[in-house]
Image (cartoon, grey):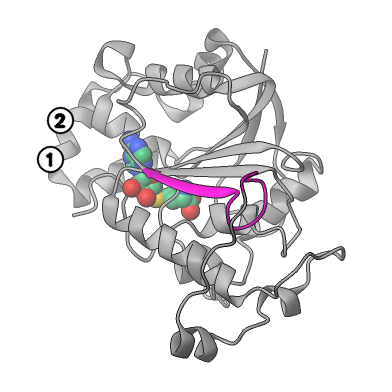
Amino acid sequence: MASHGNYRGYQGVSRHDGQNSASHVVDYRLQVLVDTLPDIFAGKDILDVGCNNGAISVHLGNTTCRICCPATVTGVDIDPELVKKARSHLSFRYSRTAPGETTTGNDPERNNYFPISSVMEHGHRPYPEDPVPTKFPRNVEFHCEDWAKTSISEAGSYDVVLALSMVKWVHLQHLDEVMTKGLREFFGKCHSSLRLSGYFVLEPQEWASYERAVKKNKSLGGNLQKLKIRPEHFESVLKEIGFNFLQKAEGKGLKRNIFIYQKK
Ligand SMILES: C[S@@+](CC[C@H](N)C(=O)[O-])C[C@H]1O[C@@H](n2cnc3c(N)ncnc32)[C@H](O)[C@@H]1O
């Protein structure tokens, strides 16, 4: 039972409306975010909370792909199996990229230079020695932790925090309040983790999705009854914490709203 939303096949077909979900296909939400706010990722340090199998973190960090070009990406997930998958996915993606630097835009040929069959036959390519960890794949790392619970070790270290389709699980598991390490604490931690003017990118699940989750995870039903904060209140909670609403991401194919907030 995926009681933290730790679905195994989440970053696959279901997210791509049945279109090609192969790992070289960029998650459409990233393209929409770049179209909405072109400077959102470039040169930035990014935290992807609830990174699942790492598909988004790896695409973000893959400078061969060049739609985003951040400096570093840190993915965090509560599920150790998913974090293992994410690390393996990073290594696999790196093994398929052409050696050397690229100066052109998004280049699927460089991105998929070595065929899958050759990676399967020869194994993954060892990572380059690189003491300055800003180049793919050294610019991407994954950690396994319950990010709602762990104390902030790196306050003010990120320019962008992504919380895509994951807040419902923190909310259902930990309730509303700071005392329970709940939603307010989580949003506060997102705020503290950001540098001044940093972006908090939130893709909240709608209330009906909470109700559906509880039908599948009966043990969370009691918690649902206790929640007073609902998704439509998030904006005012975030304002109290110190975020300004900046923009709603606009683009074709979004299944959920994505809101961009900025740290005051
Ligand atoms: C539904 S998936 C969304 C994955 C990804 N963010 C996306 O939108 O494609 C939710 C993810 O959040 C993770 N998660 C839930 N609660 C978490 C927590 N407290 N700390 C870290 N990760 C968490 C789950 O393990 C799962 O991988």
Q: Amino acid at mark 1?
A: Ser
Specify whether 186 is left or right of 130. Answer: left
Instruction: Check the image and name the residue furthest to the right.
Output: 104
Q: Are marks 2 and 1 in contact (CB under 8 Å)?
A: yes
Residue range of the region highlighted in magenta in the rendering: 131-143
Q: Position of residue 36 (x, y in %)?
A: 77, 44
Q: Quadrant of residue 41?
A: top right
Given residues 168 and 146, the one toward you in this image is 146
Q: Residues within 10 Å of mark 2 (few under 14, many from 20)?
A: few
Q: Residue at x 31, y 35 (%)?
A: 146
**Can residue 209 be seen from the camera position used here?**
no
Image quadrant occupied by the C terminus: top right
Indicate the quadrant containing the N terminus: top left, top right, bottom left or bottom right: bottom left
Measured as percent of width and height from the top left, residue 263 is found at: 65, 18
The disc placed on residue 222 is: 2
Q: Give the residue at mark 1.
A: 219
In the displayed orientation, state which residue is furthest to the top. Answer: 240
